[in-house]
């Protein structure tokens, strides 16, 4: 005897060994919960669309393509009506990725819309932690500058006395 598991994205899995059915169902629940949490976080962060690292992201020319059926929380969440300045995410729930802003529309067809994007410098790791390494590096330089400035101030203050 086998069991068919219908997934919310339209896929179907057939389980022939019923002894592993509970494990498979639990793995599916966990996977979908992670995808839903990722989607909620993207919306909370003001992201208008996201797409995983697939062939529809041209990193060499900074072009991303969205389709009308991009509605898989955690991996593809398309938007064919993005405007300049809209925030997007290039990555997915399991791997993290990079944030970017829409620059301009490159091409629109009946099937897809292609946008040019500009990376923001913000990244999100696989655990969902958002950071900006470029900003952190400049903050470290600023702290070092302030530290040395204070030393110089103290040295000049002593020499005046």
Image (cartoon, rainbow, N blue to C red):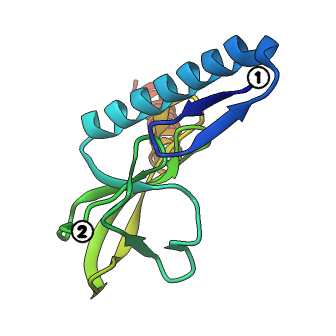
Q: Quadrant of the C terminus?
A: top left
Image check: 112 left or right of 27? left
Image check: 113 left or right of 8? left
Which residue does the image show at 21% across and 66% down from the upper left? 82
Tag 2's secondary structure? loop
Q: Residues within 10 Å of mark 2 (few under 14, many from 20)?
A: some
Which residue does the image show at 69% across and 21% down from the upper left? 24
> Is any atom of residue 155 visible in this view?
no
Which residue does the image show at 26% across and 33% down from the upper left? 44
Q: Position of residue 114 (x, y in %)?
A: 35, 79
Image check: 132 left or right of 84? right
Q: Quadrant of residue 64?
A: bottom left
Q: Nearer the viewer, residue 158 or 65?
A: 65
For marks 1 and 2, give the CA distance: 44 Å
Q: Quadrant of residue 146?
A: top left
Q: Nearer the viewer, residue 12 or 9?
A: 12
Q: Residues within 10 Å of mark 1 (few under 14, many from 20)?
A: few
Q: Position of residue 76 (x, y in %)?
A: 43, 53
Q: Nearer the viewer, residue 161 or 135?
A: 135
Q: Position of residue 52 (x, y in %)?
A: 52, 55
Indicate whether 112 appears above or below 39: below
Tag 1's secondary structure? loop
Which of marks 2 and 1 precedes in the sequence?
1
Instruction: Point out which mark residue 24 bears.
Output: none
Instruction: Point out which mark residue 1 bears.
Output: 1
Q: Nearer the viewer, residue 134 or 97?
A: 97
Q: Quadrant of residue 22?
A: top right
Residue occupied by mark 2: 80
Q: How many marks?
A: 2
Q: Position of residue 94 (x, y in %)?
A: 60, 38
Name, please, the residue furthest toward the front.
1
């Amino acid at each position: 005897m086998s069991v068919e598991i219908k997934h919310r994205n339209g896929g179907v899995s057939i389980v022939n060994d019923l002894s592993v059915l509970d494990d498979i169902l639990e793995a599916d629940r966990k996977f979908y919960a992670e995808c839903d949490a990722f989607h909620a976080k993207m919306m909370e962060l003001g992201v208008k669309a996201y797409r995983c690292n697939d062939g529809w992201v041209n990193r060499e020319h900074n072009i991303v393509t969205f389709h009308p059926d991009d509605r898989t929380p955690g991996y593809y969440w398309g938007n064919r009506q993005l405007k300049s300045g809209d925030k997007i995410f290039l990555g997915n729930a399991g791997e993290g990725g990079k944030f970017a802003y829409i620059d301009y529309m490159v091409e629109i067809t009946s099937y897809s819309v292609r946008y040019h994007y500009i990376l923001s410098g913000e990244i999100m790791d696989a655990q969902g932690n958002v950071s900006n390494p470029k900003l952190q590096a400049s903050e470290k330089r600023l702290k070092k500058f302030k530290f040395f400035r204070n030393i110089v101030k103290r040295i000049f203050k002593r020499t005046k006395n």
